[in-house]
Amino acid sequence: MEVLNLLRPTVAVSVYLTFAALALHTHPEGRRRIAAREPGYVDRFAQEVRRFYPFFPLVMAQASTDFLWNDYPFPAGRKVALDLYGTNHDPRLWPQPERFDPERFDSRAPGPFDLIPQGGGDTNVTHRCPGEPVALALLQTGLEFLAARLQYEVPEQDLTIDYTRLPALPRSGFVIRQVRC
Ligand code: HEM
């Protein structure tokens, strides 16, 4: 269990770093702003990577007591799926959700029930991922490293995302070459 606790988050963060590299590649203006260390921008870019790209599609739970939510009855014992990807792409929360736009976080801080790639609600009372601040910090460090410290070429490859695999990834991964520090 301890080994799994170490391996699973390490692999999970590497998936986000792959998407971060893809986002830098497809948004060179964002790359330039991160390399210039524009205050606060890398945080907004990292949050948009977590919102935009697929990861855990949903989390499962079981109602422990009867309750009513928005006129939907949930009897005790009912299995419930929380649609993480759907919530992160709901146009009622995220205007133009299929657009990668870090600036959407200029005017709003993510709340506990809208940006939910790692589960929702209050970490202290739910199963929301307790590693979220660690994952975010590693993602920001990785983005700064790729944008400001490394130079590389991105050869021709298939960067379309395979949504049938879990976790989803670009079909070619993200291959770089001629890497220089
Ligand atoms: C890309 C990074 C990560 C992703 C996408 C991710 C995602 C998730 C998700 C979806 C859950 C289940 C939430 C729920 O059931 O409501 C979870 C739980 C958990 N995560 Fe993460 N995680 C990541 C990184 C990490 C890291 C870095 C750590 C530790 C440092 C970590 C530790 C845990 C633990 C211990 C739980 C179980 C919490 C509980 O059941 O109360 N995760 N994670």
Image (spheres, rainbow, N blue to C red):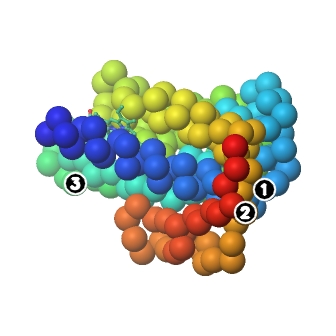
- Where does the image place residue 32, in percent across and percent down from the top left? 84, 44
Asked if the residue at label 3 sits under 8 Å from ligand 1, the reply is no
Q: Are marks 1 and 3 in contact (CB under 8 Å)?
A: no
Give the SS element for disc 3.
strand
Q: Are marks 2 and 1 in contact (CB under 8 Å)?
A: no
Q: What amino acid is at disc 1? A: His
Label ID, residue 27: 1
Does residue 173 sit above or below 145 in this rendering? below
Q: Which is nearer the eye, 90 or 9?
A: 9
In the picture of the structure, the residue carrying the numbered disc 3 is 79
Quadrant the C terminus occupies: top right
At a point 21% along the width and 43% down the height, the residue shown is 4
Please name which of the two marks, 2 or 1, marks the residue nearer to the observer.
2
In the picture of the structure, the residue carrying the numbered disc 2 is 153
Which quadrant of the figure has residue 23? bottom right
Distance (Cα) linking label 1 and label 3: 40 Å
Mark 2 surroundings: few (<14), some (14-19) or many (≥20) residues within 10 A: few
Quadrant the N terminus occupies: top left
Q: What amino acid is at disc 3? A: Lys
Label ID, residue 18: none
At a point 46% along the width and 65% down the height, the residue shown is 168
Does residue 88 sit above or below 154 in this rendering? above
Q: What amino acid is at disc 2? A: Glu
